[in-house]
Image (cartoon, helix red, strand yellow):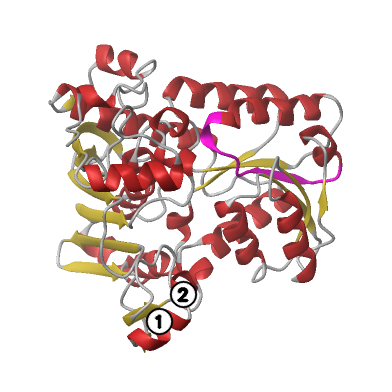
Amino acid sequence: MKTLRLGFIGAGFIAKFQALALKQVRGIDLVGVVSPNRAGALAKYATENGLGDCRVYANVAELCKHCDVVAVFAPNHVREDLIGQVFAAVKAGAALKGVICEKPLARTVAQARRFVAMAKDAGVPTCYFENQLHMKPIKAQLQQLRPQQEVMGPMTLARCSEEHGGPHEGWFWDPVRQGGGVLSDMGCHSIACAWYCLTPIGKPLTYLRPIAVNAEVALLKWGQPKWREDLLKRMGVDYAKTPAEDFATGTITFKNPDTGQLSKAQFTNSWMYEKQGLRLFMDGMGPGYAFELNSLQTPLNIFIGDAAANAVADSESALEKSTASRGLLAVESNEADLYGYVDEMEDMRDAFMAGRPCLADWSYGVEIVRLCAAAYMSAEYKKTIDLTDPATLAELETFESLIAQGKGREVLYVG
């Protein structure tokens, strides 16, 4: 097997998680990283764990000279400049086989389309990293239920949620830098996964046509005085002035273009989940069959009493974003694989090495950004958004929610 030389732009939380996934992937060497902070720590981790001779580069242009593929794992608000630097390096002679961008592709539909246009102009294939499409349980249920789908018809209801106690870094909490709150951060996951589960096996990701979106957002926990103060102290973000939603839920209606059959995707996301830690819950219903997935139903549980918990505080060694370090804890022994990071790396490797499309490219990422924008629009306008209406579609192209503009107090209750 040939080896793909991969470079990271960004060295924060998601970059570290992707590096963890690479420990389980053959045929990829992590050879470089560019980041204003933590680059050295990530390079050291990569080298010590046999991921490749990873070097810290001074800028994006230098990184691109030494890679086959670069992955943009940088914060949302700096991506446009960095992606521009990648394609400038390509035009200057860097021979990249592809460019990866972590979800969400962009903060607005207009920005997402600019990214796609830059890639097309540079003639470089793209990959949109949406790890939940690659989760082994999701792929397994699709394969297991394939005969039922072929005889009875595809699923018509999918419900996907992702919930935890809140992000690790300040920019995620800041609606202006991030592009919104939990809907932008995690709703993109749940919308993509539900759409994928509803799609008839063998059809492209965007085969089902979204025709309507109805959604709600709210600030339920982190707008309360005690939690606002905690957030300001830990993350430097003031929800008394520029709040973002910590809860979002909604329904997207899809139409099968060949049969006219309607299907529904429900999504729920929150930054106020108060149980063990990160929970993914997905289920789907078809005519006479169903599936259900709960990431907290693990084969391993441990118990830590008060005395031991006081001696050692290591909650996240058991589960990402764990909220407790004592009591009965669910333990995920291989989160990078469970959440789909390993499989998405393998899909990217195989696609770029063979010169074929990845499961998801940036054009698909545009559609996810558009559905998230429609959900924000629905919540803001307090109505169902008709995605068959030309005027509405035109408005979505330039829509930016009040929350993303830093005007969340106009639509969110702050205690």
Rate crowding at label 2 as few (under 14), some (14 to 19) or many (20 or more) other CA atoms within 10 Å. Answer: few
- The residue tagged 1 is 309
- The residue tagged 2 is 313
* Label 2 secondary element: loop
The kind of residue tagged 2 is Ala
Q: Quadrant of residue 37?
A: top right
User: x, y (%) of residue 102?
Assistant: 54, 44
Locate the C terminus and report the quarter of the image it occupies: top left
Q: In the image, which residues are magenta?
A: 66-77
User: x, y (%) of residue 280?
Assistant: 33, 62
Rate crowding at label 1 as few (under 14), some (14 to 19) or many (20 or more) other CA atoms within 10 Å. Answer: some
In this view, the residue in front, 153 or 194, is 194
> In 3D space, how far apart are the residues under numbered discs 1 and 2 (Cα atoms)?
6 Å
Tell me, yes or no, whether the two marked residues, 1 and 2, touch with CB atoms within 8 Å.
Answer: yes
The kind of residue tagged 1 is Ala
User: x, y (%) of residue 396?
Assistant: 33, 19
Q: Please state if 98 lies on the left or on the right of 214 as rendered.
A: right
Indicate yes or no whether the magenta region holds residue 126. no
Indicate yes or no whether the magenta region holds residue 68. yes
